[in-house]
Image (tube, rainbow, N blue to C red):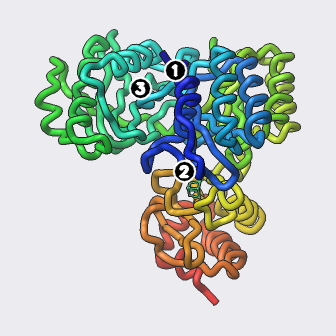
Amino acid sequence: MERKAAHLAMERQPTGNGAMDMRRGACPTLAAPMQTGDGLLVRLRPVRPGFSLSEIVVLATAARRFGNGILEVTARGNLQIRGLFPETVPSLAAAIADAGIEISEGVAVETPPLAGIDPTELADPLALAADLRAAIIAHRPRLVLAPKLSIVIDGGGRLHLGETSADIRLRAVRDGAAILWLLGIAGTDRTAKPIATLTPDDVIPAVLDVLADLARLGCDARGRDLQAESLIETIASGHALRHPAPADIAPLPVGIHDCGRGGPILGLGLAFGQTDAEKLIALVVDLERLGAREIRLAPGHALLVPGLRDADVAKAQAAAFAHGFRISPDDPGNHIAVCAGTGACASALLDTKAAARLFIETAPELLDGSLTLHLSGCAKGCAKPSAATLTILGAPLGYGLVVNGPASAAPNAYIDQKTIQTAVARLGALVRHNKHAGESARSCLTRLGTDATIAAVQQG
Ligand code: SF4
């Protein structure tokens, strides 16, 4: 069923003028790649949480052969292959199908990156996710849903998805010896509206009811368009609606995670969310020598490597560092969300990677891990759709600064392109000169207020 994607790509070609067959806001799949500044881009969501090492080699080799060799892991943990041509997308799809790599199409059903191997998770969500995908595909009448609709099934654990926004979310909750699933809509673990607490058997019928409601509202309807009150009435569960406290914020995936009997997990960050085929293949060769068998994709532009022995983790980490991957949770680059930017995306009005380097060199005070800095080529905000403490985005009239909002929000101020360097230096100085002992950059900026931040970038 999933491998149909490969054949779809062969049947549905881009038009001769380069315009792609996709609705605005749709995801760039093998069947409908997206035109960017460096060619076509496809986003691949593996059916399982990760790829085997041999599958990674197939994907990297295909990215080099059929694209420009650049691979990305997105903010939600999907793989992107860039620099493709209309005539090479079918070859990429065929290479993926020939290798038996299962790519998920349709509604995104997302699970935590360590699902099934993290002994601290309350429940393994993988079987439920597979059953739900199958039920959605089998549903008649066919459910026509918004292309970006997402369902999170979060069994908890170290790298849970509590901060990942979703249209529909399921969170495992303990009820004595039993595990129930809290169904919520529209938001993160903290902000979603709770609808029902369900036994595992009741989950799929309830989610299908919600999806049917969305389909009735229209093919662009999202979780925020649903009426929570009416869903609470219609989805009777027999269990009291639970409001458990949100889980603590999950640690960054980069670093070494002690998963007890699950063994150590090595987390690697992709510098600015990207790597290239040569580096990825070189990493795979080293990891295979050290006993790893798979690589999982993680939200936050990261890779997770299970299956290493304690004695080999440091060796694998050193090899990854040598191939250009981030290995430290303290790397200031981990706290900057960066999209492709100019040169790689036709919509970009900001060289996001150059801006990121500028912040690292000029304003390291901001990158203490307490806040996320979002550098976006345009107001679409691909790298971080949710709000960030500070967002700088490319705009027709210079660079927009958004404080405590998403890239799509109206900027609080504009920065002239010629003064970006001094504006960034002033932002750093604002925190450096005003931060109390032990205070984080985020607390400092919050205490000083939005007006002080705006004044800093607009001085002089
Ligand atoms: S945010 Fe804009 S510039 Fe950046 S990748 Fe998305 S569309 Fe391109």
Position in image of residue 240 (x %, y %): 18, 24
Q: Give the Cα distance between marks 1 and 3.
A: 24 Å
CB of residue at label 3: within 8 Å of ligand 1?
A: no
Amino acid at dot 1: Lys
Secondary structure state at the residue bearing disc 3: strand
Q: Are marks 1 and 3 in contact (CB under 8 Å)?
A: no
Amino acid at dot 2: Ala
- Going from N to C along the chain, the mark reached first, 2 or 3, is 2
* Ligand 1 rendered quadrant: bottom right
Within 10 Å of the Cα at label 3, are there few (<14), some (14-19), or many (20+) other Cα atoms?
many
- Near-viewer residue (417 or 124): 417
Q: Which residue is mark 1?
A: 4
Residue at 60% from the left image edge and 67% from the top image edge: 436
- Going from N to C along the chain, the mark reached first, 1 or 2, is 1
Q: Give left or right: position of 256 versus 384.
A: right
Q: Are marks 2 and 3 in contact (CB under 8 Å)?
A: no
- Near-viewer residue (111 or 309): 111
Amino acid at dot 3: Ile
| Rendered image: mark on residue 350 | none
- Near-viewer residue (221 or 312): 221
* Residue at the far front in the pictured view: 16
- Going from N to C along the chain, the mark reached first, 1 or 3, is 1
Q: Which residue is mark 3?
A: 153
Q: Quadrant of the C terminus?
A: bottom right
Q: Nearer the viewer, mark 1 or mark 3?
A: 1
